[in-house]
Image (cartoon, grey):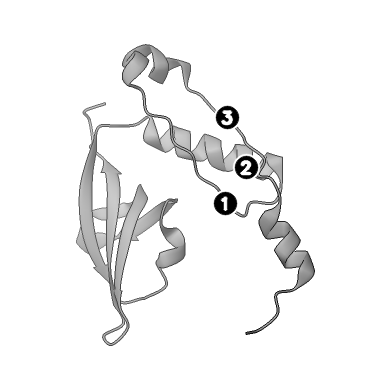
Amino acid sequence: MAAVDPLFAQWLQAQADHVVVTDAAGLARWAATAVTTTRTTSIATKAAAQTEAARQLAFLSRGPFAIDVHEFASTDWLASIGLVVTISNDELGYADGVDVFVLGVESDTSTGISAVIVLRPLKGLS
């Protein structure tokens, strides 16, 4: 078994810093049924964590949502699970670029194709 670098091991065992971001309009709209999400990442600074939290909150407050599944000729999607990404693709109807939340990925390394499951805001219904 390979040895783990002591500094890396210490980093893995360190306490996580937490950033809480709330949306007053969302809380007023959904009250006790509002959803709280928690995500532990390797974001290094509190400022970067606040920026990412604000970005995810801005996306998630735009519901209602549809779940879409798209196939891409790439197997590099696993790191995107749990993130908001922008997809620009004329064939998918995302010509202007659409921010989506990546829910899951099923990659087939033999074909090099990934099925990417995303959460997309419905237009005109929020």
Q: Secondary structure at mark 1?
A: loop
Q: Secondary structure at mark 2?
A: helix
- Residue 98: tell me if it is visible: no
Furthest-front residue in this view: 1
Quarter of the image for the N terminus: give it.
bottom right
The x and y percentages for residue 47 are 69, 40
- Label 1 crowding class (10 Å Cα cut-off): few <14, some 14-19, many 20+? few
Q: Which mark is residue 103?
A: none
Q: Which mark is residue 41?
A: 1
The x and y percentages for residue 80 are 44, 59
Left or right: 24 with respect to 117? Answer: right
Q: Is residue 84 above or below residue 112?
A: above
Residue at 31%, 82% in the rendered image: 112
Which of the 4 image quarters holds residue 46?
top right
What amino acid does circle 2 point to? Ala
- Label 3 crowding class (10 Å Cα cut-off): few <14, some 14-19, many 20+? few
Q: Which residue is mark 3?
A: 20
Which of the 4 image quarters holds residue 113?
bottom left
What amino acid does circle 1 point to? Thr
> In terms of sequence position, does the residue under pointer 1 or pointer 2 come before the other?
1
| Residue 115 or residue 88, whichever sits in front | 115
Distance between the alpha carbons at the discs numbered 1 and 3: 14 Å
Residue at 26%, 26% in the rendered image: 126
The x and y percentages for residue 64 are 25, 32
Residue at 51%, 24% in the rendered image: 22
Q: Which mark is residue 49?
A: 2
Q: Is residue 34 above or below residue 48?
A: above
Q: Secondary structure at mark 3?
A: loop
- Label 2 crowding class (10 Å Cα cut-off): few <14, some 14-19, many 20+? some
Q: Are marks 1 and 2 in contact (CB under 8 Å)?
A: yes
